[in-house]
Amino acid sequence: MKINNFVFRKEGPTTTVVPHRFDGVRSEQLSMGKILTVFLFLAMMCPSASLGQTANTPSSSASPASDTQSTRITKLEQAAADAKSSGDNAWMLTCSALVLMMTGPGLALFYGGLVRKKNVLSTMMQSFAMMAIVTLLWGLVAYSLAFGTGNSFIGGLHNMFLRGVGAQADPDYAATIPLQTFMIYQLMFAIITPALITGAFAERMKFSAMSLFMVLWSLLVYAPMAHMVWGKGGLLNASLGGRFPTLDFAGGTVVHVTSGVSALVCALYLGHRIGYPKQPMPPHSVVLSFIGACLLWVGWFGFNAGSALSAGSLATSAFVATHFGAAAATLSWSAAEWWRNGKPSALGAISGAVAGLVAITPAAGFVSPMSAIIIGLAAGAFCYFMVAKVKMIFGYDDSLDAFGVHGAGGTLGALLTGVFASSAVNPIFKDAQGNTLASGLLEGNAHQLLNQFIGVVIAWVLAAVGTLVILKVVDLVIGLRVSEDHEIQGLDFSQHGEEGYNWESPG
Amino acid sequence: MTKVEAIIQVSKLDAVKEALHEVGVEGMTVFEARGHGRQKGHTEFYRGREYTVDLIPKVKLEIVLADDMVEKAVDAIVAAARSGKIGDGKIFYTRIDEAIRIRNGERGDGAL
């Protein structure tokens, strides 16, 4: 049918949107806007107080004609180190960009396509807002709380306003790249983690409440978890001598378990969307979700392989494991669907890929490609089961399956890391003499599974308790859920004054 | 003057258009529609949830004709749109009181 040959008109009254000028909720929205403006003005004052930081000076080297042998060797060693540093830094900056892309537009599209048309912009805006809000928060204080020197549970305030975070490397974290690179890379993780939670309360949470929630969540849940697993002195830090060393290469516990469990708590606290589950709410555009999922897959190479913090063979290993995990999970989810429903759907395939990527995240730099395949196959099937069966049984409205994929997939991946981690891939555990020790269960280290379990439990508890407290506080202060009218109208208009698609506009 | 409304399968639109042009019908308006008569819908699956789609996409044509053209036009539509299966659609007539050509104000059969 050639559509462009005739005029199509939708039967029925033309849509005219009339803005509500006089209800109390609109005036609340206006005052939220004013509060935000004042806050931003004050926030601008803070960094200017610390403008006396040392600027980044590039290293310079003079080379006089008459150099002794040892001077030349020293210079050669320096040049070699600079070259490695240059390669590592180029890779890490690229990875930082890739991980940011995972949020925008990756996650924005993935989630945006899954909601109803009337909520597409608000869903995308939630991810985008994280890019802005968490960035500022990170620079002001959150980086310091996550990666600054502190205690086993949280960092200190020494690196507030990014003080001390410059061109100089910090060998505890990454010896060959500027600490500033490390900081910006970690920021991208801090951005996407809260963005993942938005999937649970899609289509019914106030933008103002969500923004406040995310600020508090980043400080009270993300920063402590990141510190415990990756920060200096962290309780669970496997590389820096934590008490319960948890193997978490790129954030299975820090990112996926915390966000997934928080998502479940949010879904339970906020309750069902109006009409759920009787009213059909299919994704308005699986096309958008598809594009988003592919961007997530590609971006995930930055997420996992970049967690090697260098451009060497470990990065390659993590890259390969990531890819194989995603592919395997795509197939196992699709197979499960094909069996159960008779047809493998596109939405199922991309969901499977994401589940696999989630599960391989903690394992990426510790497992072989074949182990990655097994992890992927397990994740695809398990997450499909969580989303298609368990959610129905318990009846919670985790709108975009943030818990089903990230919470469940992350938990599974973290535990399987304890099974499949191999010192041949990554000799992470060494004894006092420097001999390599076994990493995971299959290699003979059964104890590590217990440590993984401890890490997972801590993530679950921190996320659940923290989220519940924050939800309660935000609910009391502003109220979490939009009004019934606003929910039915759609959040694009009620929260943002827009429509996602104006395809029917006359003229 | 008679208005003929025909609800047909989406895939039959081109054939019906051709057939109408052949019998000399020069004007028509076409709408995207959704609906059903006795035709059952189908189910779609999204992430394990089953959705029943029972408003099936159809095309609706409206043509206003001089009374002596109606028989020819309806026969043409039926011949082009019929497949013999449930879901082929329906045709309705109504009487039209007046027709006006906007360009020059012409009225009645001349405006058609």
Image (cartoon, rainbow, N blue to C red):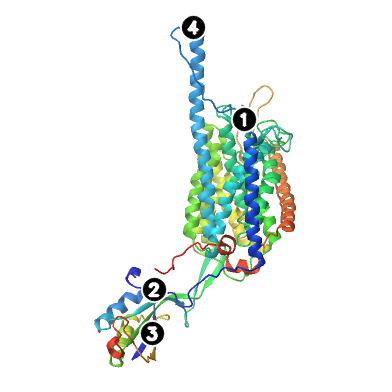
Give the quadrant of the N terminus of chain A: bottom left
Which of A440/A130 is in front?
Answer: A130
Are discs 3 and 1 both within one chain? no
Decide which of tag 4 and tag 2 comes sooner along the chain: 2
Q: Are marks 2 and 3 in contact (CB under 8 Å)?
A: no
Are discs 4 and 2 both within one chain? yes
Q: Secondary structure at mark 1?
A: loop
Q: Position of residue A234 (x, y in %)?
A: 70, 35
State the residue position of label 1. Answer: A52
State the residue position of label 2. Answer: A8
- For the point 67% across and 64% down, the residue is A395
Question: Spatial distance from mark 3 to mark 1, Cα to Cα?
Answer: 78 Å
Question: Spatial distance from mark 4 to mark 3, Cα to Cα?
Answer: 98 Å
**Which chain letter matches label 3?**
B
Question: Spatial distance from mark 2 to mark 3, Cα to Cα?
Answer: 15 Å
- For the point 53% across and 45% down, the residue is A325
Give the side of residue B94 with respect to residue A219, left or right.
Answer: left
Q: Nearer the viewer, mark 4 or mark 1?
A: 1
State the residue position of label 3. Answer: B5
- For the point 65% across and 44% down, the residue is A42
Q: Secondary structure at mark 2?
A: loop
Please state which amino acid type lies under the numbered disc 4. Thr
Please state which amino acid type lies under the numbered disc 2. Phe
Q: Are marks 4 and 2 in contact (CB under 8 Å)?
A: no
Q: Position of residue A418 (x, y in %)?
A: 65, 40
Q: Nearer the viewer, mark 1 or mark 2?
A: 1
Which of B67/A330 is in front?
Answer: B67
Which of A306/A413 is in front?
Answer: A306
**Which chain letter matches label 4?**
A
Decide which of tag 1 and tag 2 comes sooner along the chain: 2
Question: Spatial distance from mark 4 to mark 2, Cα to Cα?
Answer: 84 Å
